Image: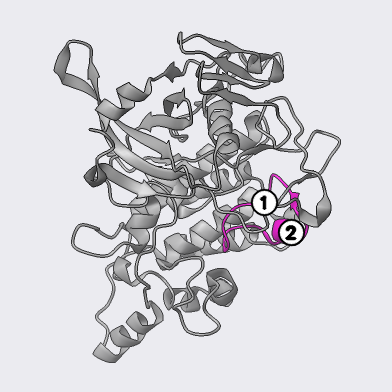
């Protein structure tokens, strides 16, 4: 799940949620009874018998179940599977430590194997996220994942397969993403982590843009925690947005923003959101711009180990994005110069638009996606770099000082 800095509503304003999709909020009624293992909320009721009664369907607009969206849809009803704790304990071999894929604010994520009944050799690889009892996050984020991913279906959103609630145990079960997170591929080190070539980076960025554009155009869902660690990759490097614990419905037609407590991740959160608690749909666009800069440079959004003045990536790199020749000086050294300079500059220009200080000045995710698809369609081939002197290479490498990998979100370790 995402991180938060002020845990209280900004400026004493009560968090609000508007729209048609039901989300978990601080004042939503909820009860957990260890004796009956029941979970009661305003949106779902789950019992040990395995039945689910949902009133969440009515929270969507009437036409949303039938209205088509490009390659995605809002399901008329959730079809999530209810797992028993024993099921998931067996699937992860009693949550064995060597099966941990990553760890975040919510808890650890384990690799698991879900056997088909009566056939131990056939089954499905899964990822199981288990709440840490000492976590500051919990029921609200768990319910948010179920409410959103239980109904939103798109090739560029990670698939939630089901969940478990037994006594105090909260777990979520996802499809397994074999290539891990974009964060690990950009910032991970060691022989097991191969640098991403230019065409794969562009493919990942476009896939993530499609996921965000779907969220924004389907029900005005604001993702709120867009970052490299929340972009997962399947075996073919198709990007899927994960971790909907902080997702929130955007403003109604008569409003420009939602006022809420400030949560997310430093370095990615839009300035207006951090300063005021005002959350716009285009606050996600800012986070996307930050990730574009990370893809270009191979550097983290925030790194206190970099020299003074370079801790915040976007503040430091913005002047380089305006000039094609300057841009080459901050491009990821692991690309070894093998990137199309025209396309890279166009991506840099797009990133600058996404990083505009005022939300109104940023493009929509639909416009961002269309721009990136045009860049990809141009099919400019990476040019083999000319040989450079030893001093030039050393200077370039000095700019790209890397800090040790510090995973702070789930799915950030290389998946085995």
- The label shown at residue 404 is none
Q: Would you say the magenta stretch is mainly helix, strand or loop? A: loop
The kind of secondary structure element at disc 1 is helix
As drawn, the residue found furthest toward the front would be: 35
The kind of secondary structure element at disc 2 is helix
x then y, percent, for residue 372: 51, 49
- Does the magenta run of residues contain 270? yes
Residue at 25 percent across and 26 percent down: it is: 90
x then y, percent, for residue 406: 39, 63
Given residues 23 and 224, the one toward you in this image is: 23
Given residues 142 and 234, the one toward you in this image is: 142
As drawn, the residue found furthest toward the left would be: 121
Magenta span of residues: 263-282
* Alpha-carbon span between mark 2 and mark 1: 8 Å
User: Mark 1 Cα within 10 Å, few/some/many (few <14, many 20+)?
Assistant: many
Q: Earlier in the sequence, mark 2 or mark 1?
A: 2
Residue at 24 percent across and 89 percent down: it is: 390
Residue 125 shows in the view: no
x then y, percent, for residue 392: 32, 87
Q: Which residue is mark 2?
A: 272
Q: Which residue is mark 1?
A: 283
As drawn, the residue found furthest toward the bottom would be: 391
User: Mark 2 Cα within 10 Å, few/some/many (few <14, many 20+)?
Assistant: some
x then y, percent, for residue 271: 69, 62
- The relative height of residue 328 versus residue 72 in the rendered view (above or below) is below
> Would residue 380 appear left or right of 193 to someone viewing this image?
right
Callouts 2 and 1 close, C-beta under 8 Å = yes
Residue 295 shows in the view: yes
> Would residue 260 appear left or right of 90 to someone viewing this image?
right
- Does the magenta run of residues contain 59? no
Given residues 335 and 255, the one toward you in this image is: 255
Q: Which quadrant, please, contains the C terminus?
A: top left
């Amino acid at each position: 799940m995402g991180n938060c800095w002020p845990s209280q509503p900004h400026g004493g304003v009560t968090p609000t949620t508007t729209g048609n999709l039901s989300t978990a909020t601080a004042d939503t009624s909820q009860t957990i009874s260890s004796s009956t293992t029941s979970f009661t909320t305003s949106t779902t009721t789950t019992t040990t018998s395995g039945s689910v009664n949902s009133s969440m369907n009515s929270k969507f607009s009437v036409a949303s179940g039938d209205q088509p969206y490009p390659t995605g849809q809002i399901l008329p009803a959730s079809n999530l599977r209810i797992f028993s704790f024993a099921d998931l304990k067996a699937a992860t071999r009693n949550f064995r430590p060597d099966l941990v894929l990553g760890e975040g604010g919510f808890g650890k994520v384990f690799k698991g194997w879900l056997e088909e009944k009566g056939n131990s050799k056939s089954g499905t690889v899964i990822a199981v996220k288990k709440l840490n009892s000492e976590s500051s996050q919990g029921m609200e984020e768990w319910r948010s994942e179920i409410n959103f991913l239980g109904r939103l279906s798109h090739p560029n959103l990670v698939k939630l397969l089901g969940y478990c609630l037994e006594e105090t145990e909260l777990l979520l079960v996802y499809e397994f993403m074999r290539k891990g997170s974009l964060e690990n591929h950009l910032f991970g080190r060691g022989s097991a982590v191969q640098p991403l070539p230019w065409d794969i980076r562009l493919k990942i960025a476009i896939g993530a843009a499609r996921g965000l554009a779907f969220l924004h155009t389907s029900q005005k869902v604001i993702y709120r925690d867009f970052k490299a660690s929340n972009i997962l990759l399947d075996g073919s490097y198709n990007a899927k947005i994960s971790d909907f614990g902080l997702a929130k419905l955007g403003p109604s037609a008569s409003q420009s923003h939602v006022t809420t407590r400030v949560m997310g991740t430093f370095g990615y959160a839009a300035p207006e959101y951090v300063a005021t608690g005002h959350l716009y749909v285009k606050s996600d666009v800012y986070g996307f711009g930050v990730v574009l800069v990370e893809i270009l440079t191979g550097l983290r959004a925030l790194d206190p180990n970099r020299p003074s003045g370079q801790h915040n990536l976007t503040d430091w790199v913005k002047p380089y994005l305006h000039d094609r020749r300057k841009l080459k000086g901050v491009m990821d050294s692991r690309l070894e110069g093998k990137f199309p300079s025209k396309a890279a500059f166009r991506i840099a220009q797009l990133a600058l638009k996404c990083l505009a200080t005022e939300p109104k000045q940023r493009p929509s995710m639909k416009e961002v996606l269309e721009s990136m698809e045009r860049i990809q369609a141009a099919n400019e081939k990476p040019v083999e770099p000319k040989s450079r002197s030893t001093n030039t290479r050393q200077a370039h490498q000095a700019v790209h000082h890397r800090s040790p990998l510090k995973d702070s979100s789930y799915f950030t370790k290389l998946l085995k």
